[in-house]
Amino acid sequence: MDRQKSKYRWVVFFAVLFSYMVIVSQRTAPGLISDKLMSEFHMTASVIGLLTGVQFLAYAGLQIPIGIFSDRFGPNVFLVTGTLFSGIGTFLYSISPNKACLLVSRVLAGMGDATIWINLVLILSQWFYAKEFVGLIGYAGMAGSVGSLLATVPLTAWISASGWRQPFFVTGILLLATAVMLYVVLIRLPQKREGGTHANTKVRHEKMLLVLKRILKSRQAWAAFLCHFGLVGTYVGFIGTWAVPYGMHIFGMNRPEASQLVMTGLIGAIIGAPVTGWIASRLGSRKKPYLLIQTLIFLAWTVFFLSGGKPPLFFAVLLMFVIGYGNGASALTFAVVRHSFDVREVGSVSGFANTGGFLSAVLLPSLFGKVLDHFHAEASVVGYHYGFLIPAFFSLFGVLGTVMIREKTRVGENQAA
């Protein structure tokens, strides 16, 4: 079966995107109940930040190894296993009786989440031509943003109606079922259609240490790392932990209203992925639109700080939309990777780039929480005022990374994946 001409590739595409959508919802969903966990388990803001950070720490720590192993052994088994881990972690979160169990559950969820994006990129590289990649990676990013959007107003309404445990319980079961679906779509059915030819093909692989050394010496790989550090981690770290409490404490919103503030950013992310991909294709450049977006994100976080942590509400909504749009546009990082490296290294370099984004997402919630605790201001504007210095500073690295990008090829070139 010629994968890149097969109609079955669209079955693979939508199965993988559905899985990504559900898994991503569990990055931001815990942020809706930060105050509930603080009350029920008697946690400080710093501990809540740690609880979020440990999920992203597991994610970030596994990106490079998963990228290297996925390049070597293929993405399918890793994606199925990761979805299974995510389901187990989410299910355990729903029944956690204490802080230790919450911590373990978020580690498992982070381990599962760590597999999804790298292997999604690899699967698209295997099943689609490179000329299709920029557009499809944009739609993949949009699917993730839809997952995060589901974890705002709809999930808030569910939590209000049934408490916080039931939604996580049901989502955990859904993820376990999704793992079974992925096994059938990615492994079982292709084996039947291809007669096992792919499984029997032997390929000589370069030593992993040599691959890692080459990545660490690559300016383009570091550019992708810094782009993701400045853009993704600031957004995910804030949305996933402090955005809802910020809306409730600073603007006096109730939980559904605060989740609508988060939803504004997610709408921006949904738009940002496909629109920026289209613009990049039209311009024949990934660097030019990306540099503009990275600069706007730095300015947006800076405005939050310069306004004393409390800009006018309509302006805060606009800033959240812009920051969300930037997160959606971060799919360009992997368009840069796909067009800069051999397809056999796409997983490894994608893992390295993703490490940057989620290293930032590890650091931001804890640092932000420490600032709030320092000022004894989890419910006061002064803590958020100084807390916004952190994402503003982090976003500067994204600007630097974009400046470092060297464009080698045009976006629209007809190149086999």
Image (cartoon, rainbow, N blue to C red):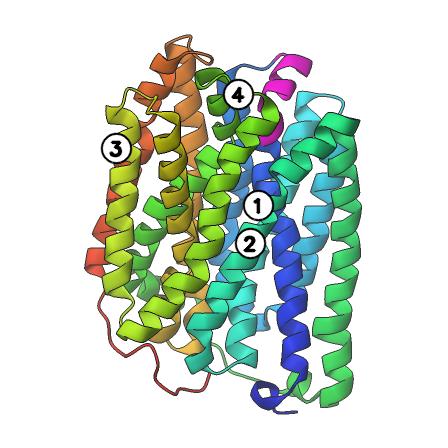
Residue labelled with disc 3 = 302
> Distance of mark 2 from mark 1, alpha carbons?
6 Å
> Distance of mark 3 from mark 1, alpha carbons?
24 Å
Residue labelled with disc 4 = 253
> Distance of mark 4 from mark 3, alpha carbons?
23 Å
Residue labelled with disc 1 = 148
Find residue 187 and report its horizontal and vertical position in percent: 72, 74
Res 92 → quadrant: top right
The residue sitting at 66% across, 60% down in the picture is 18
Task: Check the image and report above or below for 221 versus 88.
Answer: below
Mark 2 and mark 3 in contact? Answer it, CB < 8 Å.
Answer: no
Find residue 201 and report its horizontal and vertical position in percent: 62, 87
What's the amino acid at mark 1? Ser
Find residue 27 and report its horizontal and vertical position in percent: 57, 42
What's the amino acid at mark 4? Met
Q: Nearer the viewer, mark 4 or mark 3?
A: 4
Sequence-first tag of 4 and 3: 4
Instruction: Please tell me whether mark 3 sits on a helix, a strand or a loop.
Output: helix
Q: Which labelled disc corresponds to residue 144?
A: 2
Q: Is residue 105 visible?
A: no
> Which residue is more in the foreground, 316 or 71?
316
What segment is highlighted magenta in the picture? 32-42
